[in-house]
Amino acid sequence: MRPNPLNDTVHFLIQPAWSTPVFWVLLLASIVVALLVWARDPLQRAPRDVALWVLRVLVGAMWWQQSLWKIPPNFDGLKYWMGQEAEHAAPDLHRNKQVRRLRGDDEAGRHRR
């Protein structure tokens, strides 16, 4: 039996997980922005625009729900393949950088000046 997407999304949004408060903060920010636009721009007060906002929030909630199951539980596979990349890299510069990164010697993601 296929789940009802609305019901499934509501159940997802009330379950206790780290993603629930993050989503609610984003939803509240969306509501604040929508209310500000509603108050400042009379052209945005049409029922069509409100319906579009509601549909966008619903699609966003379903997207958020479906994106979370793809988060890996651990990074063992990534660590293995990064090690393979470091071990078999062609240029020495790339190999040395990967080895330092895996050992924790290199500050990954920081720009040096």
Image (tube, helix red, strand yellow):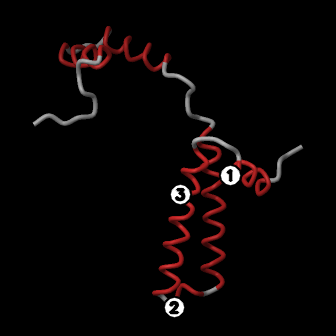
User: Which x, y percent locates residue 11?
Assistant: 75, 50
Q: Nearer the viewer, residue 67 or 24?
A: 24
Residue located farthest toward the right when viewing the structure as drawn: 1
What amino acid is at disc 1? Answer: Leu
* N-term mark: 1 or 2: 1
Mark closer to the observer (1, 2): 1
User: Which x, y percent locates residue 53?
Assistant: 60, 71
Q: Which residue is mark 2?
A: 42
What amino acid is at disc 2? Answer: Pro
Q: CA distance from mark 1 to mark 2?
A: 32 Å
State the SS at label 1.
helix
Check if mark 1's residue and mark 2's residue have beta carbons within 8 Å. Answer: no
Label annotation for residue 25:
3
State the SS at label 3.
helix
State the SS at label 2.
helix
Q: CA distance from mark 1 to mark 3?
A: 12 Å
